[in-house]
Image (cartoon, rainbow, N blue to C red):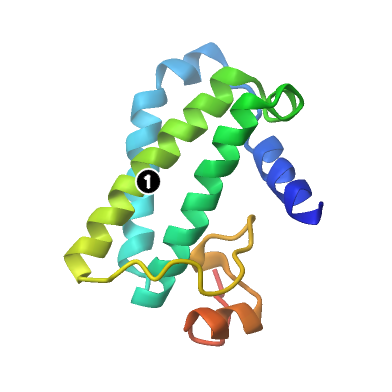
Amino acid sequence: MSYLRQIMQRLHDRSTPLPAAERAEAPGRLEEHLALYDARLEACSDAMLQYEAAWLEQHIETLELCGSQPTMLASAGGAERVEALLQESLCFRQRLERCLRQRGVEGGGLRAAVVASEHAWELSDTALRRAWGFPVEPPTA
Protein backbone atom coordinates (compact mmCIF):
# COMPACT_ATOMS: atom_id res chain seq x y z
CA MET A 1 0.00 0.00 0.00
CA SER A 2 2.92 2.32 0.70
CA TYR A 3 4.07 2.01 -2.92
CA LEU A 4 0.64 3.03 -4.21
CA ARG A 5 0.56 5.93 -1.75
CA GLN A 6 3.97 7.16 -3.07
CA ILE A 7 2.71 6.96 -6.64
CA MET A 8 -0.49 8.81 -5.89
CA GLN A 9 1.41 11.52 -4.00
CA ARG A 10 3.81 12.00 -6.93
CA LEU A 11 0.92 12.19 -9.41
CA HIS A 12 -0.97 14.57 -7.15
CA ASP A 13 2.10 16.81 -6.83
CA ARG A 14 2.25 16.99 -10.63
CA SER A 15 -1.50 17.35 -11.10
CA THR A 16 -1.99 21.05 -10.53
CA PRO A 17 -4.18 22.05 -13.45
CA LEU A 18 -2.42 24.33 -15.93
CA PRO A 19 -3.96 27.70 -16.78
CA ALA A 20 -5.13 27.98 -20.40
CA ALA A 21 -2.11 30.12 -21.38
CA GLU A 22 0.30 27.49 -20.05
CA ARG A 23 -1.58 24.68 -21.81
CA ALA A 24 -1.07 26.56 -25.07
CA GLU A 25 2.68 26.56 -24.36
CA ALA A 26 2.70 22.80 -23.64
CA PRO A 27 4.70 21.82 -26.76
CA GLY A 28 7.45 24.25 -25.73
CA ARG A 29 7.33 22.91 -22.19
CA LEU A 30 7.69 19.36 -23.46
CA GLU A 31 10.79 20.32 -25.42
CA GLU A 32 12.24 21.93 -22.28
CA HIS A 33 11.51 18.79 -20.25
CA LEU A 34 13.03 16.57 -22.95
CA ALA A 35 16.19 18.70 -23.09
CA LEU A 36 16.53 18.52 -19.31
CA TYR A 37 15.92 14.76 -19.39
CA ASP A 38 18.58 14.33 -22.09
CA ALA A 39 21.07 16.24 -19.93
CA ARG A 40 20.22 14.09 -16.91
CA LEU A 41 20.67 10.90 -18.96
CA GLU A 42 24.05 12.05 -20.26
CA ALA A 43 25.25 12.50 -16.68
CA CYS A 44 24.11 8.99 -15.67
CA SER A 45 26.38 5.98 -15.37
CA ASP A 46 25.33 2.84 -17.25
CA ALA A 47 23.95 1.37 -14.01
CA MET A 48 21.92 4.52 -13.45
CA LEU A 49 20.48 4.22 -16.96
CA GLN A 50 19.37 0.67 -16.18
CA TYR A 51 17.67 1.85 -12.98
CA GLU A 52 16.03 4.71 -14.89
CA ALA A 53 14.72 2.24 -17.49
CA ALA A 54 13.13 0.10 -14.76
CA TRP A 55 11.81 3.22 -12.98
CA LEU A 56 10.33 4.64 -16.18
CA GLU A 57 8.61 1.37 -17.11
CA GLN A 58 6.97 1.24 -13.68
CA HIS A 59 5.99 4.90 -13.98
CA ILE A 60 4.37 4.32 -17.39
CA GLU A 61 2.53 1.24 -16.08
CA THR A 62 1.26 3.32 -13.16
CA LEU A 63 0.01 6.08 -15.45
CA GLU A 64 -1.74 3.52 -17.65
CA LEU A 65 -3.35 1.94 -14.58
CA CYS A 66 -4.31 5.36 -13.30
CA GLY A 67 -6.07 6.10 -16.59
CA SER A 68 -8.33 3.10 -16.08
CA GLN A 69 -9.19 3.69 -12.41
CA PRO A 70 -11.65 6.55 -11.77
CA THR A 71 -10.48 7.21 -8.20
CA MET A 72 -6.81 7.32 -9.17
CA LEU A 73 -7.64 9.40 -12.23
CA ALA A 74 -9.51 11.98 -10.17
CA SER A 75 -6.75 12.28 -7.56
CA ALA A 76 -4.12 12.67 -10.31
CA GLY A 77 -5.84 15.66 -11.88
CA GLY A 78 -8.16 14.07 -14.43
CA ALA A 79 -7.88 12.27 -17.74
CA GLU A 80 -6.30 15.16 -19.67
CA ARG A 81 -3.53 15.59 -17.09
CA VAL A 82 -2.78 11.85 -16.84
CA GLU A 83 -2.71 11.55 -20.63
CA ALA A 84 -0.27 14.45 -20.86
CA LEU A 85 2.00 12.84 -18.25
CA LEU A 86 1.80 9.52 -20.09
CA GLN A 87 2.70 11.11 -23.44
CA GLU A 88 5.62 12.94 -21.83
CA SER A 89 6.80 9.68 -20.21
CA LEU A 90 6.61 7.86 -23.54
CA CYS A 91 8.81 10.58 -25.05
CA PHE A 92 11.22 10.14 -22.15
CA ARG A 93 11.32 6.40 -22.87
CA GLN A 94 12.29 7.07 -26.49
CA ARG A 95 15.13 9.34 -25.32
CA LEU A 96 16.27 6.77 -22.77
CA GLU A 97 16.21 3.94 -25.32
CA ARG A 98 18.27 6.05 -27.71
CA CYS A 99 20.81 6.78 -24.97
CA LEU A 100 21.02 3.08 -24.03
CA ARG A 101 21.60 2.13 -27.70
CA GLN A 102 24.27 4.80 -28.17
CA ARG A 103 26.16 3.51 -25.15
CA GLY A 104 25.59 -0.14 -25.99
CA VAL A 105 23.95 -0.77 -22.63
CA GLU A 106 21.77 -3.84 -22.45
CA GLY A 107 18.52 -3.66 -20.53
CA GLY A 108 19.24 -5.45 -17.29
CA GLY A 109 15.64 -5.70 -16.15
CA LEU A 110 14.75 -5.21 -12.53
CA ARG A 111 17.84 -5.88 -10.39
CA ALA A 112 16.54 -4.41 -7.15
CA ALA A 113 13.65 -2.32 -5.90
CA VAL A 114 12.76 0.95 -7.60
CA VAL A 115 11.62 3.93 -5.55
CA ALA A 116 8.53 5.39 -7.21
CA SER A 117 9.38 8.93 -6.18
CA GLU A 118 13.06 8.92 -7.23
CA HIS A 119 14.63 8.99 -10.69
CA ALA A 120 18.10 7.44 -11.00
CA TRP A 121 19.79 10.76 -10.26
CA GLU A 122 17.62 11.22 -7.16
CA LEU A 123 18.02 7.76 -5.60
CA SER A 124 19.08 8.30 -2.00
CA ASP A 125 18.85 4.85 -0.40
CA THR A 126 22.41 3.56 0.06
CA ALA A 127 21.43 -0.12 -0.09
CA LEU A 128 19.50 0.38 -3.33
CA ARG A 129 22.32 2.45 -4.82
CA ARG A 130 24.69 -0.41 -4.02
CA ALA A 131 22.28 -3.06 -5.38
CA TRP A 132 21.95 -1.18 -8.68
CA GLY A 133 25.70 -0.60 -8.94
CA PHE A 134 25.64 3.17 -8.32
CA PRO A 135 28.30 5.03 -6.40
CA VAL A 136 27.26 4.68 -2.76
CA GLU A 137 27.20 8.41 -2.04
CA PRO A 138 23.74 9.85 -2.86
CA PRO A 139 23.43 12.85 -5.15
CA THR A 140 23.93 16.29 -3.65
CA ALA A 141 21.68 18.23 -6.03
Q: Nearer the viewer, residue 126 or 23?
A: 126
Q: Position of residue 17 (x, y in %)?
A: 63, 22
56 versus 140 height, above or below: above
Front position in the image: 92 or 107: 107
What amino acid does circle 1 point to?
A: Phe
- Residue drawn at point x = 64 percent, y = 32 percent: 66
Please say whether residue 62 is visible from this viewpoint: yes
Picture quadrant where residue 129 is located = bottom right
Does 6 sit left or right of 1 as displayed?
left
Determine if residue 45 is in view. Answer: no
Q: Residue at x 59, y 64 (%)?
A: 114
Outermost residue on the right side: it is 1
Residue 35 in the image, given as x and y percentages of width and height: 32, 47
Give percent across and percent down for residue 32: 36, 40
Which quarter of the rendered picture does the C terminus lie within? bottom right
When asked about the image quadrant of residue 41, the answer is bottom left
Could you tell me which secondary element the residue under label 1 belongs to? helix
Residue 74 in which image quadrant: top right
Q: Residue at x 20, y 62 (%)?
A: 101
In the picture, measured across the screen, residue 49 lies left or right of residue 126, that is left
Q: Is residue 7 above or below residue 70?
A: below
The answer to whether residue 75 is left or right of residue 15 is right
Residue assigned mark 1: 92
